[in-house]
Amino acid sequence: MTWKLKTLIAALALCSGAGAAQADGELHIYNWGNYTSPDLIKKFEKTYNVKVTLTDYDSNDTALAKVRAGGHGFDIVVPSANFIPIWVKEGLLLESRPDQMENFKNMDPRWVDVPWDPGRHYSVPWQWGTSGPVVDTAIYKGDINTSAIWLDPPAELVGKIDVVPEMNDVMYSAIKYVGGKWCTDDKAVLKKARDTLKAAKPKWLAMDYGIEKFDTHDYAAAFYYNGAAFRAREVTPTVRFGFPKEGFALFMDSVAVLKDAKNPENAKLFQNFIMDPENAALISNFATYANGIKGSEKFMRAGLKDAPELNIPAEFAAVAEWQEICNPEVNELYTKIWKDLLK
Amino acid sequence: MAVRAPFSVRNQPGFVAIAAICMFALYLPICTYVSYAFNSSGTGNGWEGFTLKWFGIAWQNREIQDAAWRSLQIAVVAATAATIMATLAAVATTRTAPYRGLTLKYVLINQPLIVPEIVTAVALLIFFARIKVWTDYSGMGYLFIAHTAFCIPFAYLPIRARLEGMDLTLETAASDLYANGWQTFREVTLPLLWPGIIAGYMLAFVISLDDVVITDFIKSGGQDTLPTFMLGQIRRSISPELNAAATGFLALSVLAVTVFYLINRKRN
């Protein structure tokens, strides 16, 4: 082939949709359920001429168990921050080097040197958020930036509170509330946390997923996730999300490529693709959590960009931290308290 | 002398109350859930009027479509295969003089009823994962095989019950009249057995349709069934279109059962 012909082909390829030639094929994504924007998938399929399949999981443990067993057929997985070190340690992830990708420049520097993937050698932020008190301010007018909303509820809220049935999130907030450190095995602190939880539980209405019941005023408060609080506010304008001053945990789910992926090149394309602000905004528009890509705000739907739920106020930023995985002995203690609470 | 009414469970004290509680516990949640599918309120809270729009939206949702279609495929394949095997197994274990090891065979056939589902699921996950790595095949075959396996006892039990209740003299008579084994089976046993087979098929079909644990563990990329898909949605909220899809599935099952019931009644 002459260089002219080559140039011509390259030019044609460029015109017909950004280097589609090298990326034909498939991509199998394994992600949390109801978390992936269909528009994002459609756009990726169209841009790279790749057929994408999406399969759901409902817990980090399920995803880990399936991939560990091998033969799963997935290319991409989206584990939570505290699970990524396990995935890396077990050699399940491909070092796809997102930090060397073209769109890496768009990643918010705040999320680059995270303790669980320093320098981002494996993963790209999908969405991040936090859990905290959600309050209908038509019913309670006091300070909502405290875990006391659900751990020592004011009279207005008693009997109208929903608490998410997630052990780690609940335990984290309770331990912080009584002044302890996450992953502590200090019996005095844990006893205090347990007593607080047990005293609070009779004042709750439910421990369920989903906080749509603000709409009917069955719930006046909840301990839940900020993205969901945003959606609740869209329906019931008086709902607010609080950032507890006692401390709160950050979570982030990140996109990583599996070591035994059949389509690693497409998977890397996908990682690069979602670091494009316009595409990252599609993720947020669907699931209403922040995404970690600079400039994506411009493309977010109305109301989401400045949503108070998704932007941690400067005064509370210092008490936010990553929720690590505790060692098995500590975890066992927490599980015991949790089971006791659920009784 | 007063005539005593013959014993009937209906005359026992509390019968009506207990029956009513059972009916409520069984059907009230389902009715509530179904009503959500027709509720025009998007959040599923409070009644805001009747609508069919969710059915239209669900019908157009590619993910729901794919998951529902996959569920049906698996249920048809698994129920058919399981019923054939269960019929053969039932004939073999009832039309024979008892021998050593027969009980062991019952236990083996009914193993999925005894072993906790999660154990089977993890075992299959590890086992199939090896095969997937070796053969590089990760299609629907694994789901077909797994579903067939755990559906067998559900098809087997009604068929065996029917066989045991059948009059053996008819088969003996057929043999006396020089029918060979196949003819006896084809002309006498099978027609009489038919209601049992249909009952077994229906049970297997429904069991396959709503399986979550095993499916979740062995599904490969793009193989969500309607139940695993619904499970994945639950952290956010159950959307009304999903209610509509599930209602459609329920209607389909009820329809299938009704049709089989009508066929059955005619034959008898």
Image (cartoon, rainbow, N blue to C red):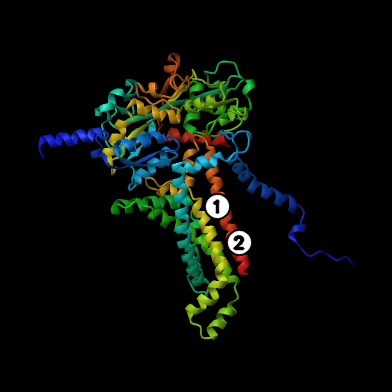
Could you tell me which chain the residue with mark 1 belongs to?
B
Residue type at mark 2 is: Tyr
Residue farthest along the bottom direction in this orientation: B177
Q: Position of residue B188 (x, y in %)?
A: 55, 76
User: What secondary structure is marked by label 2?
Assistant: helix
Which image quarter is the N terminus of chain A in?
Answer: top left
Q: Residues within 10 Å of mark 1 (few under 14, many from 20)?
A: few
Left or right: residue B30 compared with residue B135: right
Q: Which percent across, then down, holds residue B21?
A: 69, 48
Question: From mark 1 to mark 2, how far is it between C-alphas?
Answer: 14 Å
Q: Is residue A202 above or below residue B267?
A: above
Q: Residue at x 45, y 50 (%)?
A: B69
Upstream in sequence: badge 1 or badge 2: 1
Q: What residue would you read off at disc 1?
A: B252
Relative depth, front residue between A17 and B231: A17
Q: Residue at x 48, y 38 (%)?
A: B233
How packed mark 2 is, by other alpha carbons closer than 10 Å (few <14, some 14-19, many 20 or more), is: some
Please name the residue shown 37% across and 37% down the image.
Answer: A42
Q: Which residue is labeled 2 in the image? A: B261
Look at the picture and state if B254 lies above or below A301: below
Q: Is residue A269 above or below residue A144?
A: below
Work out whether residue B163 can be spotted: no
Tag 1: amino acid = Leu
Q: Which mark is residue B169?
A: none
Residue B203 visible: yes
Compared across the picture, whether B9 is left or right of A14 comes to right
